[in-house]
Amino acid sequence: MKLSSVSSAEFYEVYNSESARNRIITQYYPEGIKRGTITYKNNLSHGAYKLLHRNGKTKETAMYSSGIPISLKRKYYENG
């Protein structure tokens, strides 16, 4: 796993692979709570994209295929 600090005030990312082209990125809030996951294939977003609120409830969801959105991005309120 590789740790990459995107912005210490917002979140950080953990990569499951050293490959820059194909990977799953898991994002965490600074306090260690999971923020979301996104999968890349050939360096393009591919598959499910999901962000979570700090309380663990879904914040955003979408589906991608080779970098192209194939679903609407859905946003959810923190209280559900």
Image (cartoon, rainbow, N blue to C red):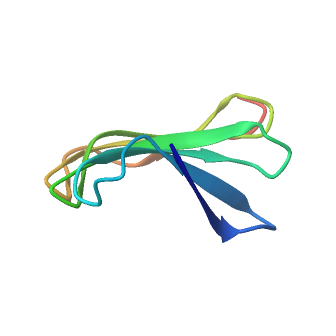
* Of 15 and 71, the residue lying toward us: 15
Against 4, residue 18 (above or below) is above
Q: Quadrant of the C terminus?
A: top right
Seen in the image, is 76 located left or right of residue 70? right
Residue at left offset 50%, top offset 42%: 1
Residue 39 seen in the current view:
no
Q: Measured from the top left, where is residue 79 in percent x and y?
A: 78, 32
Q: Quadrant of residue 12?
A: bottom right
Against 58, residue 28 (above or below) is below
Residue 49 seen in the current view:
yes
Q: Quadrant of residue 48?
A: top left
Seen in the image, is 75 located left or right of residue 65? right
Seen in the image, is 73 located left or right of residue 2? left
Q: In the current view of this chain or complex, which residue is farthest to the right?
A: 31
* Of 20 and 45, the residue lying toward us: 20
Residue at left offset 81%, top offset 52%: 30
Residue at left offset 75%, top offset 63%: 10
* Of 40 and 73, the residue lying toward us: 40
Q: Measured from the top left, where is residue 23 in percent x and y?
A: 32, 46
Residue at left offset 29%, top offset 60%: 20
Q: Measured from the top left, where is residue 62 in percent x and y?
A: 36, 43
Number of numbered discs overlaid on the protein picture: 0
* Of 65 and 11, the residue lying toward us: 11
